[in-house]
Amino acid sequence: MFDILGIASRNLLRYRRRTTLTLLLIVIGMVAVLLFIAVAGSFRAMMVGQITDSVLGHLQVHRKGYVASIDNLPLNLNMKPQMVAKVEDALQANPAVETWSPRVKFGGMFSNFAETTSIRVNGIDPAREAATTPLLPGRMIEGDKSGALVGRGQIVIPLLLARGMKTKVGDTVVVVATNRDGSVNGKTFVVRGILESVTGPGGRDGYVHIDDARELLRMNEAEVSEIAVRLKDFSRLDRTTGQIRAVLEGVTSKEGKPVLETHSWADLSPFANLARMIDLMTLFIKVVLVSIVLVSVMNVMIMAVFERIREIGTIAAIGTPPSRILSLFLAEGLMLGLVGTVAGTLLSLVAIFGINLWSPTFNFGQQQNLVMAPTIAGGDVLTIAALVVIVAIVASLQPAWKASRMDPITALRHV
Amino acid sequence: MSLVQASNLTKTYRVGDIDVPAIKGIDFAIEASSFVAFVGPSGSGKSTLLNMVGCLDHPSSGTLKVLDTDIATLDRRAAARFRGEHIGFVFQDFNLIPVLTVFENVEYPLRMVQEWPAAKRREQVLRMLDAVGMSDQADKRPDQISGGQKQRVAVARALVSQPKLVLADEPTANLDHDTAYRILELMKKMRDEFGTTFIFSTHDPKIMGEAEVTFTLEDGRLMTNSNGGRHV
């Protein structure tokens, strides 16, 4: 094998310019793919992190039908305390769950005594909410960030609302809401802070204490609109969502129908489609890389076989087994793939390191000055590297097979 | 037992719809350790005959036995194995591998065909290079040596695996007269030293006389056999 690789490398060096150009193509392809994966992957991870860690949580549990009507924030589809207890039992029993936060969600009117507008509000337990969505307190751009996110009698409002209503931290405002029976109730709050808006559902909601929400809505019992759940390991999201869903489907009505529904963040956020698009683009660019490697290596190997027909005839005539002739040409493809992969990987890692040092910023929706910090998993690097090497070998197969099957007499006569 | 024995041997090529006979029913026998030439004008069938003796091609009919093996029974892989074990080749254009040094070219059959152990291989290659007078050029590439030197290397490569038979198709065609003689002298010397049978083809009348046994081919037929100038 070592002999074959040695001869293969010499044959590649024989056509230095052609080999260099082919390697350059492979290297450029590898760098493009790895950089794209690193940048797009980091962007994806950052956006998913923003959405899950500052608004949605990793997954949510609702009463059946709530998500379909979520735009109306229907109070009649809140979970009753018994249901909440069953959900909490299920979450408690699952070791992948880190924590969860119950929310009471409602729509109401927000008044600063001069103007009135609509508002969507989350009633939360501040400590549990901060544990479930740890980036939420960081979104507060005005107001004291220390301590609980909201206390009793306080409200945190989204930036757009504060700007539109010219409301500042410390102002007193009134929130008016209709309860499930249709009666209207109002409650005064002091503005505790102003939240930066984020992309996606709930990204422009206000927050009050859960007890204030229940009081405003005149709830007789501790109803909950949704339970946001945080997992210990985000990579186990699909499996854990499935497990929780399976358990909660066992909670049924008198008619035997499930009364609860479980959704991962991807089911709830339109950004999931963007994330899927990024995955699709990554796949597409991998296909482009495969095509580049396939075409360039195949071209080189076809030329190599064509230019060395007499040589093939000679080694075949002196008794080189066809399998060894096949190996000689496959080894050339392998060497091209290996060298291109190593050079491409090193260059990509240097480029990723350079971008991290440079730390360029970008804006996404309402979010300004997000720092681009591309990272790439070792598994992704290995997958791409293996893909390139395998494709290089596959691209050499046809020319190598042709060489190994060549009739020595015809090959020796070739001019 | 003859080293090579042909009986009513024919070879016909099909060109389009037409059958073109290249060898038309010939019989001959070649003894071990002989120095044999197939002579004749271009198109007389010399190369076709050598290709069949070298197990590179199959006869259309008749029998051809090399080292008591009917070459018609060998498939592609078996033929390659047989060539690797028993037959050496010297080509008109030398056909050295350009990316390998002189040493590596001679070493090639031992390394890539027969897989000799490294120490034994080195000893044998040095012995052969010494025998053909190329020891001092061992590290050079084929493009750094002359045509005559290339053919010496080719002879060494053909002999390195100690084959019973070496086939040389027009081995002197690309060499000047003096060099051609020296190569034939070298081949004879190798035959004397190693007992290898040499069969070469040529259409050059000036070197035909160097062979101890000459077969004259014309239009695919064996016209005369001579032994040291005597008709046999």
Image: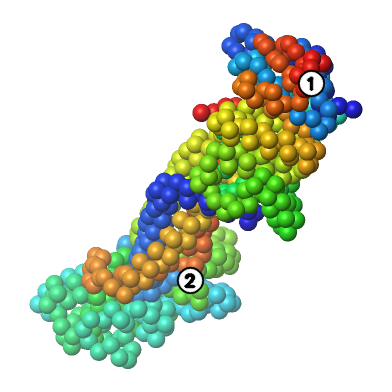
Q: Do marks 1 and 2 share a subunit?
A: no
Q: In the picture provided, is A205 more to the left or to the right than B93? A: left
The residue positioned 76% from the left and 19% from the top of the image is: B229
Number of numbered markers:
2
Q: Where does the image place residue A364, in percent across and percent down from the top left?
A: 26, 65
Q: Is residue B15 above or below residue B54?
A: above
The disc labelled 1 sits on which kind of residue?
Asn
Q: Which residue is mark 2?
A: A234
Q: Is residue B70 visible?
A: no
Q: Where does the image place residue A244, in percent across and percent down from the top left?
A: 55, 68
Eye-nearest disc, 1 or 2: 1
The residue positioned 62% from the left and 48% from the top of the image is: B134
Q: Which residue is mark 1?
A: B227
Q: Is residue A271 above or below residue A149?
A: above
Q: Is residue B167 visible?
A: yes
Q: Examine the image and state in which quarter residue A151 appears.
A: bottom left
| Chain at numbered mark 2 | A
